């Protein structure tokens, strides 16, 4: 018994060490954001800021309209995530649990679209966006990315494990397909929906190329566009860039911590027992 | 009574017939408009010498023929494939291992999960900045400590081989958290009743893993493999931020090569043709994987 | 009940998509009617230092003085400039004007400024001759120069003092590249430097040596590439030797270490850069720094560069755009722009500006610019050819530095790419 406990502690410590190694670069970035420009480039470098200063944050906030960009990013990310989770759960459910003509073809076709790098179809996509009136429109950032093939794939694979008997039982009881979806599938799918929510929020929050193409009005810039402007042709304003990047990381982290609580074991089992 | 049952069953089946299509409709519309149509344009471009600004001329298969003759294209494709072949298994193993651990009852597991996941959220510019600071030849932290302890500096980013290793390590750091989350979701969908039964039968940890966890994890495993292969082949912003494709092009992979032709040399036709080839390659891989694994159905 | 929910959800989704489309169209319509009353000029801009803020003030001034025109500054990062402009132009939504470094690439879409600003000769006579080929093509004015740059040598005064090395006080006393090896040794051994010099990673900076050894990329009428002649090989050999003998660190050209951050650590003697770095290094307090004359090869030379504003066709506000460009390039506005941004003016009548900082340094840059061989502008102004060559140009230099190929082989490769670009143009 004691031997097992010791082994457990060793494994735990190994994981903590690994986690620490993972975290080190990020901690260093946070420390750097609190260093003034002369300390940032000192050699040999300092780890902890010797002259702790908030000047980077103040300058960056003053230079740009960061409150506005934050709001734009949040608006886009939240609404797009809601839409994403809804439509991909629906589509994933259909592709997982219904045997209909073209189901497999559609699935592979959707996934196939992942293989087309955005950089390559930038120009035709811009024409499409413009012709739909979505150019310079914040909905252009919200709707097109919502049909994410990765999200679809995740929901479909997860919902494969829903037992067919569950659905048959409900059908015999007279439930319509919609009823099955809302009352039966959605509760089971909660962990996967949480995963998708986390990912979707992060993807929309970190989107760069797409807003670059779609948005031209500086008032509609998202935070990634604004951060990118700290990079000049030869000079990079590392101080402001670091400060703003640190701030930009916080909402994504918060969303993660909130939704990861949904990762609970055995939701499917509990469905079975009902 | 029997007749009514048959007709209502028929009606049910018909209704059910339409329903799946309705569920897919929103996704499908968006794909059609924003992905399929531009992709068709891209396909058309591949048969022209379009440069983005002037009138395009139809040149048939000329682009494709040039690509097949282009030694550099094949070299870049080879490098990308090697990179993918190394990175994908490593990501699979590590993220599964970490996920498997982080679903147990562990102190602070929420925070530890967040730590592994955090690198996936960081923008590539910052990743490049950090890793360059760590691995810089003369002004890098790793070499600084190596020197302090009496060792010679390693030219991490200046030699081709070391740079390729650096790129692989940075990729792992950046992507493991993402796949860890997917595995956590997959692992937790396996009903505990199976594990309870195995425990009663006295199975060892490894037996449980091999005969219960892995098989029931098939849908998730398939997805992780397909997604990470596509990810690896599409690698561009991270590597660009880290090595710029260097030193001397040794870490220039496919999408960067395509991007250079499309947006720096303005040969959009040529770039589109390369993308079509990439698409066909990855599409074939995905389709085969799907067929073999029956879509991940258990 | 559930059926209703289903219908409701699909209706909501459809309405959202429709609504977004309609608001999009409505917005565009609103802007169109607004255009008739106030012309809205989209000005795509990239900034490198403080000139962004300077331009914002100029734009605000102009909009206040001309109430029928509104200028929207759309800031993008330099690396995204091409992507943004290309997608906008190819997608049918060209901006009114943009700040560019290579006007020639947009030759087909450029607003013909001759219509509004007078004949080519009248217009270009206001600006220094060496940059004329950049913005005048086929006797048409494609763009208007905003500032001119010159490559130069920035050095660490404190380090040089410690090492006991004196810098040349006039152009004729400039060092030669051969002397660099000894100077670098002194800086390292007596001054405590890690390296003698760093150079930016761009063929533009390398070409300083190319021109100083009498070489060039193209021949006079750009009908053939000549970079692989004996002079070119001499220049690249020297560049490679500087790296091999640790005057310059390999990690910059081959490993991506940033020369700016390296210079800022105070352990580098010199930075082969240009006058645009002055506003960036202004805040360095840890050591003193200054500007001195570039080392010479068989002759002295710098490399010019320039930034321009150009208008685009098909924006419906061409007239207002041209007027704004005229305003920007006028003596008064341009001088203020350059003085405040710490740039050099391209105007012939503004060669001595009243800088608030670094006046002596600008004098040296101006001298360097004057002593530049016309071959430099002849090469770099070929903006219809250069974009197709720069990647291979840079990679060729890197391959020579890594020792994979000899200088001649690397230059032969670059010449082949250049010749292909010339052939494709026809």
Image (cartoon, coloured by chain):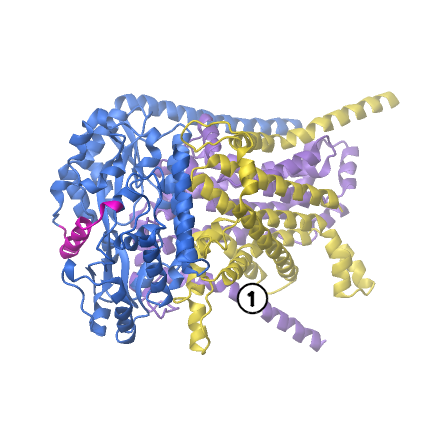
Q: Is residue B84 left or right of residue C28?
A: right
The residue identified by callout 1 is A18
Which chain gets the yellow colouring?
Answer: B
* Res. C3 image quadrant: top right
- Residue under the image location 69 percent in, 29 percent down: B19
| Residue B269 on image: x %, y % | 49, 34
Q: Is residue A270 above or below residue B32?
A: below
Q: Is residue C125 left or right of residue B124?
A: left
Q: The numbered mark 1 sits on a residue in which chain?
A: A
- Provide the major secondary structure of the magenta segment: helix
Give the answer, above or below, for where C388 lies relative to C298: above
Question: Do we see residue B1 in this rendering?
Answer: no
Residue sitting at 33 percent across and 49 percent down? A232
Nearest the eye: C231 or C290: C231
Q: Quadrant of the C terminus of chain A?
A: top right
Residue sitting nearer the eye, C149 or C325:
C149
The chain letter of the blue chain reads: C
Q: Is residue C370 magenta?
A: yes
Report the chain shown in purple.
Answer: A
């Amino acid at each position: 018994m004691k031997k097992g406990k010791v082994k457990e502690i060793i494994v735990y410590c190994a994981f903590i060490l690994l986690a620490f190694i993972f975290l080190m670069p990020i901690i260093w970035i946070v420390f750097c954001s609190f260093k003034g420009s002369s300390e940032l480039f000192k050699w040999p470098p300092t780890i902890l800021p010797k002259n702790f200063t908030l000047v980077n944050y103040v300058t960056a906030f003053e230079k740009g309209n960061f409150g506005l960009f934050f709001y734009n990013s949040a608006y886009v990310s939240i609404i797009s995530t809601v839409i994403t989770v809804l439509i991909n759960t629906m589509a994933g459910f259909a592709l997982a649990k219904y045997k209909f003509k073209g189901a497999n073809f559609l699935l592979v076709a959707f996934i196939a679209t992942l293989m087309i790098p955005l950089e390559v179809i930038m120009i035709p996509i811009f024409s499409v966006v413009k012709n739909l009136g979505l150019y310079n429109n914040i909905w252009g950032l919200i709707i097109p990315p919502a049909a994410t093939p990765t999200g679809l794939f995740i929901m479909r694979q997860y919902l494969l494990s829903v037992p067919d008997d569950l659905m048959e039982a409900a059908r015999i009881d007279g439930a319509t397909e919609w009823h099955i979806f809302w009352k039966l599938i959605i509760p089971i799918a909660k962990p996967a929906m949480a995963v998708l929510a986390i990912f979707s929020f992060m993807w929309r929050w970190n989107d760069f190329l797409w807003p670059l193409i779609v948005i031209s009005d500086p008032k509609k810039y998202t935070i990634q566009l604004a951060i990118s402007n700290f990079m000049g042709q030869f000079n990079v304003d590392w101080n402001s860039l670091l400060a703003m990047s640190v701030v930009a990381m916080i909402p994504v982290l918060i969303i993660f911590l909130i939704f990861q609580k949904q990762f609970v074991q055995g939701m499917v089992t509990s469905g079975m027992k009902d | 009574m029997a007749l009514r049952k048959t007709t209502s069953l028929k009606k049910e089946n018909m209704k059910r017939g339409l329903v799946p299509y309705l569920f897919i409709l929103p996704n499908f519309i968006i794909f059609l408009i924003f992905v399929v149509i531009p992709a068709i344009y891209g396909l058309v471009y591949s048969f022209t010498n379009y440069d983005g600004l002037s009138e395009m001329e139809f040149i048939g298969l000329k682009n494709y023929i040039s690509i097949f003759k282009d030694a550099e294209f094949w070299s870049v494709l080879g490098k990308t494939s090697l990179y993918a072949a190394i990175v994908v298994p490593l990501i699979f193993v590590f993220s599964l291992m970490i996920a498997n651990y982080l679903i147990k009852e562990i102190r602070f597991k929420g925070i530890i999960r967040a730590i592994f996941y955090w690198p996936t959220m960081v923008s590539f510019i910052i990743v490049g900045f950090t890793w360059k600071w760590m691995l810089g030849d003369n002004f890098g932290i790793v070499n600084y400590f190596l020197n302090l302890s009496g060792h010679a500096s390693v030219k991490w980013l200046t030699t081709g081989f070391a740079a390729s290793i650096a790129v692989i390590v940075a990729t792992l750091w950046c992507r493991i958290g993402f796949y860890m989350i997917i595995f956590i979701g997959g692992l937790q969908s396996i009903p505990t009743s199976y594990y309870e039964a195995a425990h009663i039968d006295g199975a060892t940890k490894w037996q449980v893993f091999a005969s219960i966890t892995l098989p029931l994890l098939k849908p998730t495993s398939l997805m992780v493999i397909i997604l990470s292969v596509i990810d690896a082949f599409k690698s561009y912003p991270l590597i660009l931020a880290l090595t710029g494709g260097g030193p001397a092009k040794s870490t220039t992979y496919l999408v960067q090569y395509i991007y250079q032709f499309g947006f720096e040399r303005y040969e959009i036709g040529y770039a589109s043709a390369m993308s079509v080839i990439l698409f066909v390659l990855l599409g074939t891989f995905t389709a085969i994987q799907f067929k073999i694994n029956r879509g991940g159905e258990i | 009940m559930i059926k209703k929910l289903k219908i409701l959800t699909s209706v909501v989704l459809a309405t959202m998509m429709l609504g977004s489309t309609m608001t999009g169209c409505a917005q565009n319509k609103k802007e169109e009617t607004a255009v008739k009353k106030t012309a809205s000029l989209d000005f795509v801009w990239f900034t490198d230092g403080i000139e962004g803020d300077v331009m914002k003030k100029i734009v605000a001034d102009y909009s206040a003085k001309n109430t029928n025109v509104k200028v929207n500054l759309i800031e993008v990062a330099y690396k995204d400039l091409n992507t943004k402009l290309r997608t906008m132009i190819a997608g049918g939504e060209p901006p009114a004007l943009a700040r560019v470094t290579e006007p020639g690439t947009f030759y087909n879409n450029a607003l013909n400024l001759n219509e509004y600003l007078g004949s080519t000769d009248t217009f270009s006579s206001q600006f220094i001759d060496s940059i004329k080929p950049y913005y005048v093509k086929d006797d048409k004015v494609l763009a208007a120069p905003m500032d001119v740059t010159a490559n130069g040598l920035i050095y660490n005064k404190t380090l040089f003092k410690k090492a006991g090395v004196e810098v040349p006080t006039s152009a004729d006393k400039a060092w030669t590249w051969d002397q660099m090896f000894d100077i670098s040794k002194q800086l390292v051994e007596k001054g405590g430097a890690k390296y003698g010099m760093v150079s930016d990673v761009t063929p533009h900076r390398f070409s300083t040596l190319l021109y100083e050894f009498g070489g060039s990329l193209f021949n006079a009428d750009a009908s053939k590439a000549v970079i692989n002649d004996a002079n070119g090989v001499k220049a690249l050999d020297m560049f490679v030797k500087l790296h091999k003998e640790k005057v310059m660190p390999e990690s910059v050209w081959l490993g991506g270490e940033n020369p700016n951050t390296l210079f800022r650590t105070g352990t580098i003697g010199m930075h082969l850069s240009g006058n645009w770095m002055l506003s960036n290094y202004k805040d360095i307090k840890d050591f003193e720094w200054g500007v001195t004359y570039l080392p010479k090869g068989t002759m002295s030379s710098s490399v010019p560069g320039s930034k321009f504003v150009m208008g685009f066709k098909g924006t419906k506000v061409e007239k207002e755009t041209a007027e704004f460009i005229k305003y920007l390039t006028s003596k008064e506005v341009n001088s203020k722009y350059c003085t405040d941004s710490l740039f050099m003016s391209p105007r012939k009548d503004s060669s001595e500006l009243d800088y608030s900082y670094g006046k002596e340094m600008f004098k040296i840059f101006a001298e360097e610019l004057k002593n530049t061989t016309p071959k430099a502008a002849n090469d770099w102004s070929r903006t219809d050819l250069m974009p197709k060559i720069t990647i291979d140009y840079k990679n060729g230099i890197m391959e020579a530095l890594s020792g994979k190929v000899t200088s001649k082989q690397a230059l032969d490769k670059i010449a082949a790419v250049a010749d292909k670009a010339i052939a494709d143009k026809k």
